[in-house]
Amino acid sequence: MAEQIQTPYVPFSSKQLHVLSWWIDPNTKDCEALICDGSVRAGKTMVMSMSYVIWSMYSFSEEQFGIAGKTIGSLRRNVIRPLKHMLEGRGYHVKDRRADNMLEISYGGRTNYYYLFGGKDEGSQDLVQGLTAAGFFFDEVALMPQSFVNQATARVSRDGGKYWFNCNPAGPYHWFKLEWLDNLEQHRALHIHFVMSDNPSLSDEVIDRYERMYSGVFYQRYIEGLWVLSDGIIYDNFDEQLMVTDAPDYATITQYYVSCDYGAQNPTVFLLWGLSDGIWYCLREYYYDARHDDSGIQKTDQQYADDLDNFLGPISAPIIVDPAAQNFIIELESRGRAVYQAYNDVLPGIRLTQSLMSNGQIKFTHNLPGLFKELASYVWDEKRAQLGEDKPLKQHDHVMDAMRYFCATMLQPEYEEDDGIQLIDHY
């Protein structure tokens, strides 16, 4: 018989133990909410979700509860899948009623019902109306609109009900920080701040790898766990000596893509990408701006498609295009081009692109003047940051958008589903 491989047991850290027991600890059991924030991979989600179910099964029977993520897909992947595994390993019986987005959990003669929600936009608040709940758990609450969270917390109307919030930091003016973290006493909330060293299952090697994935504001938020402003240069990790190189031998390139930022009144950009020895190289660019061209003539879809034909020559490559450019997509498809509509969620796309740059998974050749110009001038919008929003300033961003489209659409981790990018599993 083959030897069975045993996963080594790793004891909980002191903060994880506090999360597991805060609702019975004499010093904190009267709190009505738990907020866990901090760095990625700190072990927050795993221990919070487990504690949430243990608390609810200990305190209630035949009650309803809510569990929310940004989307149902991300919630199932990052919370429900590992939670079911942990519960079943401890003798809980879990029925996953996927058609109803509900878990029926039984243990020790008690049964409770956990409804799953996605809180991705303002319309999501309608999903929770009418629910009467004894508790609500929000995973990645900083990614949810305030209207959804307000509606969901209002559903908790049973005596002894509690709220559970988990997130990585955003800006200091984000609504969740202003409303909850800055008003802990008012909300009778317990705040536990996590960093990666609070997760005993992480080795020094793994921690070092994650620390090298980020720089600037993303390092401060996702490694140091700080609520800081997004300001200054967005791709502040760009290092010309490390990231700019000669083009590889074209005979070694095994795959090509073109990413396109299309502008009807704004510039249009094509970037040609080639894969060689496991690295994606940005090989060359096309940039046309009628407002700064000697002719001053805005090109038609057909003319841009002709320019793309000339740009590629004999190279066959699928084209990644902003989904808003539907007429241009139709023109390309009429010419037999394979077209991918780009994933266009800006902030996670920027975060992924920055990590790919830092990890050496994408590199740039020398003849990319528009790209290098924009790397030096692509900045965060300071006015939006003061309103709690992370937005790039809408200037000098056309090549940056084309670069992000390629990374976010073709290089996102394999486990990602149609709800978009989650660069790191947070459990």
Image: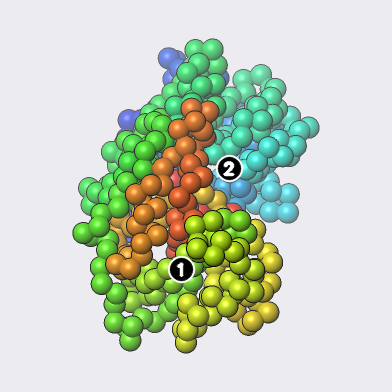
- Compared with 393, 229 (above or below) is above
Q: Nearer the viewer, residue 244 or 373?
A: 373
User: Residue 52, position in %: x, y?
Assistant: 53, 34
Q: Tell which residue pokes out farthest to the front in this image.
A: 294
Q: Decide if residue 182 is on the left or right side of residue 150.
A: left
Mark 1 belongs to which amino acid?
Answer: Tyr
Tell me the quarter of the image containing the C terminus.
Answer: top left
- Which residue, as the protein is rendered here, is positioned at the far top? 186
Number of the label disc, if any, that sits on residue 286: 1
Q: Secondary structure at mark 1?
A: strand
Count how many numbered circles sit on residues in the image: 2
**Residue 111 visible in this rendered orientation of the protein:** no
> Can you give x and y, in whole percent of width and height, for residue 234 in the image?
39, 45
**Residue positioned 39% across, 71% down in the render:** 284
Which residue shows up at 32% across the image and 30% down it?
14
Q: Position of residue 58 (x, y in %)?
A: 57, 30
The one of 210 and 94 positioned closer to us in this rendering: 210
On the image, which quarter does residue 380 sit in?
Answer: top left
Q: Quadrant of the N terminus?
A: bottom left
Q: Residue furthest right?
A: 130
Towards the viewer: 292 or 286: 292
The amino acid pointed to by label 2 is: Gly
Q: Which residue is located at x 69 percent, y 52 percent? A: 97
Q: Is residue 360 above or below residue 348?
A: below
Q: CA distance from mark 2 to mark 1?
A: 39 Å
Which is nearer the N-term, disc 2 or disc 1?
2
* Residue denoted by label 2: 69
**Is 143 in front, or is 254?**
254
> Badge 2: few (under 14), some or many (20 or more) residues near its Cα, within 10 Å?
many
Question: SS of the residue at dot 2?
Answer: strand
Q: Quadrant of residue 242?
A: bottom left
Q: Residue at x 29, y 82 (%)?
A: 249
